[in-house]
Amino acid sequence: MSLITEKDFGTPASVATETVTLTIDGQAVTVPAGASIMRAAGQMGTQIPKLCATDMLDAFGSCRLCLVEIEGRAGTPASCTTPVANGMVVATQTPKLAKLRKGVMELYISDHPLDCLTCAANGDCELQDMAGAVGLREVRYGYQGHNHLNAATDASNPYFTYDPAKCIVCSRCVRACEDVQGTFALTIAGRGFGSRVSPGQSELFLGSECVSCGACVQACPTATLTETKVIEIGQPEHSAITTCAYCGVGCTFKAEMRGEELVRMVPYKDGKANRGHSCVKGRFAWGYATHRERVLEPMIRASTDDPWTVVSWDEAISHTASEFRRIQAKYGKDSVGGITSSRCTNEETFLVQKLIRAAFHNNNVDTCARVCHSPTGYGLKTTFGASAGTQDFDSVEHCDVMLVMGANPTDAHPVFASRMKKRLRQGAKLIVIDPRRIDLVRSAHIRADHHLALKPGTNVAMLDAIAHVIVTEGLVNETYVRERCDLEDFQHWAAFVARPENSPEALEAVTGVAAQSVRAAARLYATGGNAAIYYGLGVTEHSQGSTTVMAIANLAMATGNIGRPGVGVNPLRGQNNVQGACDMGSFPHELSGYRHISDEGARNLFGADWGVTLDADPGLRIPNMLDAAIEGEFKGIYIQGEDILQSDPNTKHVAAGLAAMECVVVQDLFLNETANLAHVFLPGSTFLEKDGTFTNAERRIQRVRRVMSPRNGYADWEVTQMLARALGYPMDYQHPSQIMDEIARLTPSFAGVSYDRLDALGSIQWPCNETAPEGTPLMHMERFVRGLGRFVVTEYVPTDEKVGPRFPLLLTTGRILSQYNVGAQTRRTENAAWHEEDLLEIHPHDAEERGVKSGDWVKLASRAGETALRAKITDRVAPGVVYTTFHHPLTQANVITTDFSDWATNCPEYKVTAVQVSRGNGPVDWQISYAEKASRSRRIEATS
Amino acid sequence: MSQTRETLITMANQIATFFQSQGAPDLAARDTAQHIKDFWAPRMRRDLLDMIAAGEAQRLSPIASDAMHRLK
Ligand code: SF4
Ligand code: SF4
Ligand code: SF4
Ligand code: FES
């Protein structure tokens, strides 16, 4: 295997459809109008020397190395900033140009350390390459004059180093931070010879606005900004294309290796989701794969009070199988079940649900999507006929109005947020519906046109009010509705939202948002051009989560904003493969491709392929499994890659359910919180150690490629397969591609998917079948998947979780950029530099009333339990609302959350909990005893 | 009566509330029953029916109760 190098064309591709023909160095070339001469030359294989240009950024024209001569024009224009024209005749190599370029290079080199042999970028430095390309042989100016060679290095960022002595002030980093990332953290400070790159006001990188996305490091042509790992390890020698295992954006990377050691992850320009960009997690936070706390050997124990005993894989698997057989013999076949992982591959997820349906002989399978996007599946299937978002990410480039609801893209979906911000800077309008002032509301060069800061739990009321305005002010796109939707349903819905009680004025008291703001936002959404809705867990994690999703779908249909680029309904998926886990049949009522288990045809298809008869009734969902365990009827669970004790609501209830089981099997990288209550621990493998696929939020199926052997011995799919065999059910896959072939065979929307096709196309958006052999970027183009779009009446029903004198504040939860979910991975990386602990955000007014100051310990109590954490006083939250993240086990924010849930799917109501906050003096007793218990539970018996 | 079984009543009532809001009273019980059939494991249905039989499901709304009768 060799290092994959991507050609740098110097300037971005032109999207124009007309073409232009010109002659470069005597050769005719035809390119899209608007392309630069540099790009046109690159297209025919001619590299014009360059330093300040790179095709991720618009041309800047500062280095003067890319000069060319053009017949009939005076001077030597820069080829990066000069667009092509018909009939143009260009020369890229002439004696005059050679002399000019040498002169330019000589100046650069005269202020550059000549330690190439020992430089970390040796072999990967454009300055070095260009010195060669222009034939520089001598430098006439010495180092005697004023220079920058002693400038101090900034190593404050844990992942990259800034060595200003090597800077050529090309400003590629500054432009990358602005154009690609949208953070505007860097400036060129000073003027002329004294100018230098600087984060903020001459701050260190770590303390500045920088979010450590790494775009500047990637853009830097020299060793000035370099990955610290490259400095430590050296240049990589081979690479493979793979997909990030953190969030639902699904960024593609080149995993650059040295032997079996990962040197760096470089975002892949051809990645359709990320287009060469990434965030701090995907690019840098992979150190957990080799963290010392990773468990590499299987372990078992009779009781959760015992320490763990390390055993062989054979023993662990046969012990597990015999336990599950014993339990089923004693308590019945429905007394066991399992949970698939949204972090594992499609193939692994498919295999776990197959194990449960075919080898456990029941449908007790669920996935953590239960606790995040299950309402999306229900709501979009009901209204449109397909349980997925309607667009691809590229669609945002055609969007005129973005409505962002209950999502915090800059933290949770950073790379897509960068693309949103770029579109917003180009002039798209923005409506934010969120109780909290997320970063997008006010960030560099972006101001939301409307921020509707509603009370938590009133989403449906807000959307009904918006719909009221659209219907009563005559803003419905009637042609669209008549052609594409069920008219009777529409009329029924329109009559409902038009009722006076659904007007913004009437609902002002419910939502807490001024009626005129709601009216203005509704008008903008309905009349501002292409309008797209982006939403997240702030929509789904409510008792009316499914209703909210349907209300969103109603708005999009009523305004005709479905079925073309720039519009649509876009759920921003949390985990890397949550879409895939849902697609793969992880829900107890559904086979892969969303076919109901009661559908005889589908069931028989699977039954025949698998050689079993499948149960026709839905199985238990996670909360129902826990309830059944407490009732004494559910006794064994196989959990692959999930930490339900930390991530699911009402921790004490989850703990009681797990404690009531006789065999809890956890397959994971680390002894997570759930493992404290487990009897068997099966070590998991990381995404770097296995082959497979992930499916991102745009339904895009992308390859995950193994770049190192599994440190634990087996990929996760192999472990599931061993367990199936031990249970007497044959599974004999040699490679995950065979599992994908089975998925394709059994799932109409995946019929055209195979590893060969994925290799050929790079990625595929499902549905992919005979009618769409290359996949489907945009859904519901001509007609809805279900035929006619269905409007559903969405009546606002207040949650049962209400504030009162004992619990007067509303708690809502979220996540931050540098950490990921329960933090099991990110906490085991240098990302800890940005987020050491979970904090409680509280409004200054509420804080003052309680005598709380920033940094104080506060006690946070709800009907379900209490915990303590430190306070952060901020007006990002409204009075009456508090906010925290859930990344750290010590906080255990889910001790507080209740088990109220979405009416249709049981998705927990994380986003609304009535709480009280009071001054505290450190962790509460429960946290202390929990921490003790957890550390006792993690003991591993010394092996003799 | 256990907390976990109480949850079943809450869930059935929530479902009934939604289908009631769809505006066709005669269809609400039918749709509630269908939703429960589609998404609940048989054990959950059986537990709730047992509670109804034992007179422990007073909190069940009329529509949810009607729906459960259809699932007997
Ligand atoms: S790492 Fe990203 S945010 Fe930080 S300075 Fe570089 S481009 Fe800007
Ligand atoms: S740090 Fe690198 S990218 Fe930025 S100006 Fe200096 S050489 Fe150019
Ligand atoms: S965490 Fe998400 S946004 Fe960040 S690199 Fe990975 S996939 Fe991309
Ligand atoms: S590459 Fe064109 S001016 Fe620098």
Image (cartoon, rainbow, N blue to C red):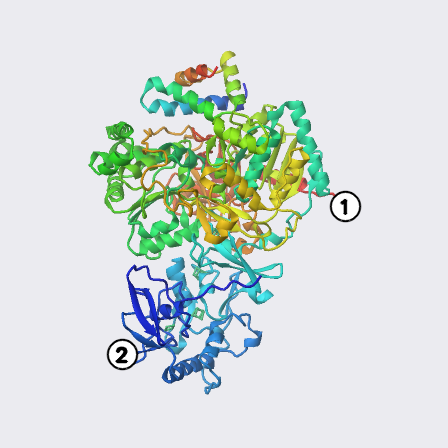
Marking on residue A492: none
In the displayed orientation, state which residue is furthest to the right: A944
Relative image position of residue A547 (x, y in whole percent) = 37, 32
Confirm whether circles 1 and 2 share one chain. Answer: yes
Q: State the residue in front, A18 or A864.
A: A18
Number of numbered callouts drawn = 2
Q: Quadrant of residue A802?
A: top left
Classify residue A364 as left or right of residue A375. Answer: right
Could you tell me how far apart the alpha carbons at marks 1 and 2 are, in whole angstroms? 81 Å
Circle 1 sits on which residue?
A943
Does A221 sit above or below residue A603?
A: below
Circle 2 sits on which residue?
A73
Q: Which element is circle 1 on?
A: loop
Classify residue A551 as left or right of residue A685. Answer: left
Relative image position of residue B13 (x, y in whole percent) = 42, 22
Relative image position of residue A64 (x, y in whole percent) = 37, 76
Q: Quadrant of residue A487?
A: top left
Quarter of the image for the N terminus of chain A: give it.
bottom right
Classify residue A364 as left or right of residue A87. Answer: right
Does A110 sit above or below residue A310?
A: below
Q: Which element is circle 2 on?
A: loop
What is the chain letter for disc 2? A
Residue at x-position 58% and y-position 65%: A237
Residue at x-position 52% and y-position 79%: A114
* Mark 1: amino acid: Thr
Does A769 sit above or below residue A231?
A: above
